Amino acid sequence: MKFNSVFDVIGPVMIGPSSSHTAGASRIGSIARSVFGESPAQVDIHLYGSFAKTYKGHGTDVALIGGLLGFEPDDPRIKNAAELANEAGMHIQFIEETEEAPHPNTVKLVLKNGMKQMTLVGASIGGGKVEIIRLNEFELEFTGTAPALLVLHEDKFGLIASTTKIIANHEINIGAMKVSRKVKGDDALMVIEVDQLVEQDLLDEIAKLDGVFQVASIII
């Protein structure tokens, strides 16, 4: 587990009985929505381990839906998240998985909107803290101690340099960076941890680069 202070152990201000099963779940849902870039029309939620066994009693279901709706963990609307999602036209399906996951509080979210689809896997590791393990076919490694930029892009010459130049022009320091690709010349993913929150105009600049498919900023 990654705890930075006693407040991480006590847990965050939240709606629900458990920081792991509600606050953490809400954050995973919120991150998925942020990375997807829009409100999904359908979400298949695959629950593993403890999440699969106790999600209804601990409010994990409404917490995940609340996050997908963009609610903060302490938002009182989380209690009615299922009804609000239905009113918003968001179809939610829960699937209880029996296979083991690396962490007992693991969830896989498959977000869909027409032909657009994204898969995100996350784990709630305690105290409201989460780890994002996978985005589509890419394995992720977040320290959880800094904001991060996710840039899904074409694997082409000069794109990494152009991206980091934009970040430098905004006088933002890069703390860590990892680039993953499955096949040379195919899709690739940059995970860039930075020392401060980024403004939307920086994301917009990166999104305009030739070969960038999607860019998002997340806070774990």
Image (cartoon, grey):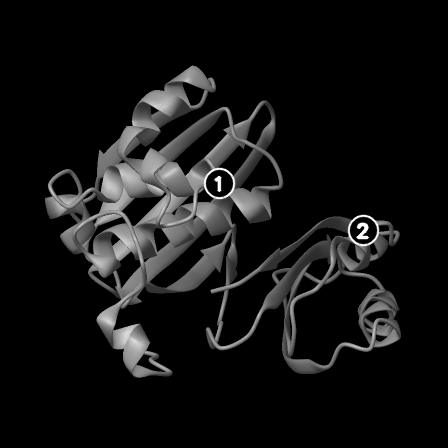
Q: Residue at 55% across / 75% down in the picture?
A: 146
Tag 1 and tag 2, C-beta contact below 8 Å: no
Report the residue marked by disc 2.
Answer: 204
Q: Residue at 41% across / 46% down in the picture?
A: 29
State which quadrant residue 163 falls in: bottom right
Give the number of the disc on residue 116: none
In percent of width and height, residue 220 lies at: 47, 65
Is residue 45 visible in the rendered image? The answer is no
Q: Residue at 81% across / 54% down in the picture?
A: 201
In percent of width and height, residue 206 lies at: 81, 57
Relative to 137, is 168 on the left or the right?
Answer: right
Three-letter code, disc 1: Gly
Q: Residue at 58% across / 69% down in the picture?
A: 147
In percent of width and height, residue 34 lies at: 56, 47
Give the structural element (helix, strand or loop) at label 2.
helix
From the viewer's perspective, is residue 58 above or below residue 115? Answer: below
State which quadrant residue 194 falls in: bottom right
- Mark 2, Cα crowd under 10 Å, few <14 / some 14-19 / many 20+, is few
Report the residue marked by disc 1.
Answer: 70
From the viewer's perspective, is residue 170 above or below residue 49? Answer: below
From the viewer's perspective, is residue 141 above or below residue 206? Answer: below
- Mark 1, Cα crowd under 10 Å, few <14 / some 14-19 / many 20+, is many
Of the 4 image quadrants, the one containing the N terminus is: bottom left
In percent of width and height, residue 197 lies at: 65, 67
